[in-house]
Image (cartoon, rainbow, N blue to C red):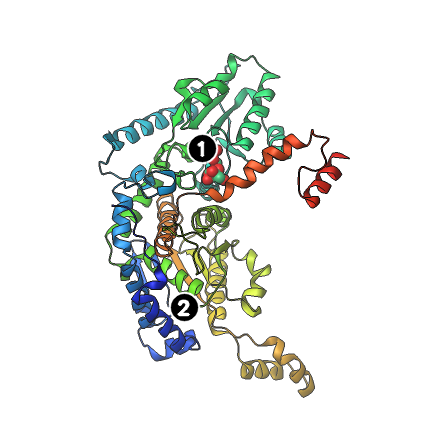
Amino acid sequence: MSLPTINPTQTKAWQELKAVFEEEKDITILDFFNAEANRTENFSIQFEDLFLDYSKNRISAKALKSLIKLAEDCELKKAIEAQFSGEIINKTEGRAVLHMALRSSENLNLDGEDLKDAIDRTKAKMKAFVEKVENGDWKGYSGKGITDIVNIGIGGSDLGPQMIVDALSYYHNDLKTHFISNVDGDHVAETLKQLDPETTLCIVVSKSFTTQETLTNANTVRDWFLKHTTQTEISKHFVAVSANVNSAKEFGIAEDNIFPMWDWVGGRFSLWSSVGLSIACSVGYNNFESLLYGAQKMDLHFRNEDFSNNIPVVLGLIGIWYNNFYQAESEAIIPYTQYLQKLAPYLQQACMESNGKGIDRNGKTVNYQTGSIVWGEPGTNSQHAFFQLMHQGTKLIPADFIGFKKPLNDLQKHHDILMANFFAQTEALMNGKNEQTVIAELKASGKSNSEIKELTPFKIFEGNRPTNTILFDKLTPETLGKLIAMYEHKIFVQGVIWNIFSYDQWGVELGKQLAKAVLKDFQSTDNSIHDPSTQALINYYKAK
Ligand code: F6P
């Protein structure tokens, strides 16, 4: 069993959806509310401490029913089982996709290997490592304990851990955690300025251990250590997370200090594996386990719940509705917590590296839109930045608003203001402000008739801008695990329906290849290697 290869546009449900769209495209969200007394109840899902309200969407019960039918016609259930049971669903790389196994309590056998056993052994190794560092028993070259952890990696070996470490700042222990990812030397230089080599421990995270940025940064950091201590002592300051043990050893990392990564865990889904070592170091091993536990709960919900009550499925289908029928190009992620300031960059890789594909699972060019552009920033800051365009611009931007009922710090007044803004924004996006109200307000403010006439068009808000509200009780490691797993599964749902392979990323290879060639060509005197524009730019750069 592998993934189905159904062109979604050829299904009966797609034809139905086209008809529903034609019938309903001019109906506003407010019209839907007016026509349906129980819309809020009907368009919301409670799962434990997670409440999803998707009633503020341009979607009717009829459209939703056809979207669910689309999921059925595209054999989503079969696809979910294929994924969870370890089928080789990442066909172009010949790999299973089993990041869920990292947070599962079930046994799973893959090609005769007991995954649970391998995972449990790795977790035990992570736990022992974290405790040793936390307790001060892991000593640097001068005998001092560790104060600072540096994660050196990029893409999935950086974004996930960095986002979680930042999101869980409230739960941090005394260790300081840093991330070096960009090959821009200023990134490593500025980070090293904050560090003392005697008390710094680096985690080199690279599944392949061939990534140019990571190896360049790791070598620079090693040179920095070598200014202070000897080659032999340096092993006290480096551990690695990699599937390529030999290369990690060649770099000089002791075999005992190499944590495994598996073929069946994709980079952008790897924070649950030993790639999450920096997370476990910064919040303690038990909190890391709670993160996994939350994700496991979402996995079970996703695997077992009916589609109509299944949060990742419903969110995935709503995304398809806007992307493929309303032709929306992007979606915004607006967390109302500063702790989730790195969520959007993380989701950009998770969503866009996964579903930014134009070839379907039959190897044919798709003739419909796939992956949407994901972007966002926390509220309320974003309200003072790009919300103008969301309220009055010409583009349709469906948005996820993510909030928490309780604050972490004891500043309830702030939290009430924050959440008042949250609810006000989703209300304003939906309701807008009509001409009558604008005129009445201008009159009340004492404007003359001619001023009112002139100003009115600028002050009207069309409204009818869709949002999902995702509310948790409180930001904890467990709720964060649920939230991230929810988005992972949403990505999968959409990839299955779009009939694309979500777990490869061939599109990043060409740039990598060319960067190596260009670097070599910096030394060349041949002026005809590249296209005229690129060659002229290289020459301009070389003339420094
Ligand atoms: O950007 C492409 C990519 O392969 C990502 O998928 C991956 O997360 C990142 O590079 C880092 O790869 P590695 O962990 O092998 O260094």
Position in image of residue 471 (x %, y %): 38, 57
On the picture, is 393 further left or further right than 351?
Answer: right
Label 1 neighbourhood size at 10 Å, few (<14), some (14-19), many (20+)? Answer: many
**Residue 187 in sight from this viewpoint:** no
Q: Nearer the viewer, residue 307 or 160?
A: 307
Q: Nearer the viewer, residue 306 or 22?
A: 22
Q: Residue lying furthest bottom in this view?
A: 449
Q: Mark 2 against mark 1, which lies toward the viewer?
A: 2
Q: Amino acid at mark 1?
A: Ser
Q: Nearer the viewer, residue 256 or 387?
A: 256
Which residue was labeled with disc 2? Answer: 57
Position in image of residue 360 (x %, y %): 39, 52
**Residue at 59 percent of width and 17 percent of height:** 226
Quarter of the figure that contains the C terminus: top right
Which residue was labeled with disc 1? Answer: 278
**Could you say whether the residue bearing mark 1 is in a helix, strand or loop?**
helix
Label 2 neighbourhood size at 10 Å, few (<14), some (14-19), many (20+)? Answer: many
Q: Amino acid at mark 2?
A: Asn
Position in image of residue 484 (x %, y %): 39, 47
Gap between marks 2 and 1 measured at Cα: 38 Å
**Could you say whether the residue bearing mark 2 is in a helix, strand or loop?**
loop
Q: Nearer the viewer, residue 139 or 364?
A: 364
Quarter of the figure that contains the N terminus: top left
Give the vertical position of 452 relative to 57 (above or below).
below
On the picture, is 455 further left or further right than 145?
Answer: right
Q: Residue lying furthest right in this view?
A: 543
